[in-house]
Image (tube, helix red, strand yellow):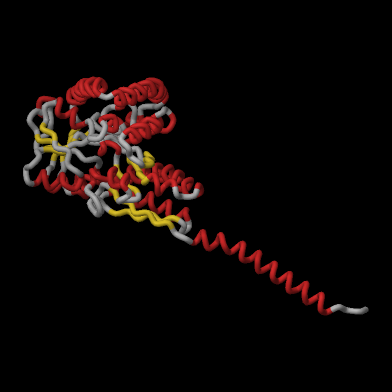
Amino acid sequence: MTTHPAPRRRFLKKTAAGAAVGAGALATPAISQAQTTSLRFQSTWPAKDIFHEYANDFAKKVNDMAGGRLKIEVLPAGAVVPAFQLLDAVNKGTLDGGHGVVAYHYGKNSALALWGSGPGYGMDPNMLLAWHYYGGGKAMLEEIYKSLNMEVVSFLYGPMPTQPLGWFKKPIAKAEDMKGLKYRTVGLAVDVFTELGAAVNPLPGGEIVPALDRGLIDAAEFNNASSDRVLGFPDVVKNCMLQSFHQSTEQFEILFNRGKYSALPQELKSIIDYAVQAASADMSWKAIERNSADYQELKKAGVKFYKTPDSVLRAQLAAWDKTVEKKGAENPQFKKVLDSQREFARRAGQWQNDYYVNFRMAYDHYFGPKAAKKA
């Protein structure tokens, strides 16, 4: 058989060249994927607080899922700007994003406090998140930010357990005991406790205990057993009043600068979206574990816990009604949000109250005084 070595060599060269081109085409996206977009975030919490830990938990989920293409670094409150300046800093691009609560922006528009402050028409914090994502709240929040010229993208997540009435030098027995007290809270709770006669000071989290220690305030609320313990409340006050309607529906907010967020490819935007959802569930589970353990540690440290009297809770509701009536008359957006929450709560609250069993009955059956006697 006659062979033709020259054509065969030309064929092999073409094949090799084609393979090289194909390999190069495949390599180009790999190089692109290896590029990392870094975003600098700041939380509104001290580095030692569990809330800052939650912010880092969210960032880790994003970073892990993004596979090196996106990296979020979270700094503690005050690292770049004070806690209450977070929204402005993210809007301006001083920060790429942040972790806080919507109520901290209350001074810009009173309606923003409705994502967390007050009784929520009987909704718990998870139900308020349901209203936000499925009952129209998300669109309303975006509308408010747009009216304020805030170029941010907001994600709400992490339903917080009901917050205590707070830490007091003397236990509160009746609503009249609030009159004249120098008290720390934030959001619309400022107006509610002012209505109850307190002199309110909306201090950031890291400033509360030093103010209590120096006598600048007489009482304060922050959030939960874990945060309160690490912030040092039991070092300066030994009485804590549990249960309150002032912030019984709060959740966290993750903010992105709109320009930075919009520049991300859709795949990374989806990772952020699903990381928010995963972090919300994870935070809920971690809160149960850590808050319950720290509650026991606070008791061991000599802290005395008292249930807030029903008379004080009813006084809060009455003060809330007066507050929202006034704010609704002043601010159409406030009334719009409030009406939307009310309509959602009427339906969802009836379902939850009718369907959910009283878990306290089962707990008392196994761990209450009568159960102890049986044991």
Q: Is residue 123 above or below residue 88?
A: above
* Residue drawn at (23%, 31%) of the image: 188
Q: Is residue 319 visible?
A: yes
The tally of labels here is 0
Q: Nearer the viewer, residue 373 or 337?
A: 337
Q: Nearer the viewer, residue 132 or 12?
A: 12
Q: Position of residue 240 (x, y in %)?
A: 17, 38
Residue 18: image quadrant is bottom right
Tell me: 273 left or right of 163.
right
Q: Position of residue 341 (x, y in %)?
A: 35, 25
Q: Quadrant of the C terminus?
A: top left
Q: Position of residue 327 (x, y in %)?
A: 24, 24
Q: Position of residue 179 (x, y in %)?
A: 9, 28
Q: Quadrant of the N terminus?
A: bottom right
Q: Is residue 53 visible?
A: no
Tell me: 360 left or right of 305.
right
* Residue drawn at (10%, 25%) of the image: 176
* Residue drawn at (20%, 20%) of the image: 322
* Residue drawn at (55%, 61%) of the image: 30
Tell me: 49 left or right of 282.
left
